[in-house]
Image: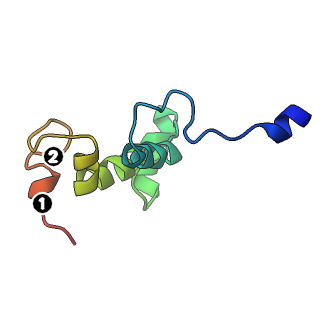
Amino acid sequence: MEQLEKAKPSELPPGSQNFTKNQMFFISYANWFCSKDREAAAIENLYVDEHPTMWARVLGTVANSREFKQSFTIRSRSPGVGAAGPLNRAEL
């Protein structure tokens, strides 16, 4: 117990030292929505749930985020971030 009281929390979780604080923000955001649905449940939710699926919430948000693209140094026409790329989209 004494050792636990003397221990200091690390600034970053193990394995995350190679990421910047901005990158860790986006990784944490995606992790917050992390879930796994059975295929049947996922298909049913497409019809009965007014909210988008978890993966669509994450991808839809980061695909439109200039900060995400800058944090991970993503080129304008990289696959997975939309045809025009987030830097070429209108900001709200």
Instruction: Determine the CA span between mark 2 and mark 1.
Output: 10 Å
Q: Which SS class for mark 2?
A: loop
Q: Residue furthest bottom?
A: 92
Query: Which residue: 91% across, 35% down?
Result: 2
Percent of width and height locating residue 79: 15, 35
State whether residue 81 appears in this view.
yes
Q: Nearer the viewer, residue 32 or 20?
A: 20
From this view, report whether residue 5 is shown above or below residue 89: above
Quadrant of the drawing holding the C terminus: bottom left
Whether residue 65 is visible here, answered yes or no, is: no
Q: Residue at x 43, y 49 (%)?
A: 25
Q: Residue furthest top?
A: 15
Residue that badge 2 annotates: 82
Give residue 67's quadrant in the image. bottom left
Residue type at mark 2: give it: Gly
For the residue labelled by badge 1, is the local secondary structure a helix, a strand or a loop?
Answer: loop
Report the front residue among 69 and 42: 69
Residue 11 sits in quarter = top right
**Residue 36 location (% of width, % of height):** 52, 36
Name the residue located 27 percent from the left edge and 40 percent from the top edge: 72
**Between discs 2 and 1, the one toward the N terminus:** 2
Please state the horizontal and vertical placement of residue 62, each as a whole percent of the image. Answer: 30, 51
Q: Position of residue 31 (x, y in %)?
A: 49, 42
Front-lying residue, 42 or 35: 35
Q: Please state which amino acid type lies under the numbered disc 1.
A: Arg
Q: Which residue sits at x=48%, y=45%? A: 28
Q: Quadrant of residue 10?
A: top right
Q: Which mark is residue 76?
A: none
Question: With 10 as the anchor, is 20 left or right in this view?
Answer: left
Q: Please say if the residues under marks 2 and 1 sit with CB atoms less than 8 Å apart.
A: yes
Name the residue tied to disc 1: 89
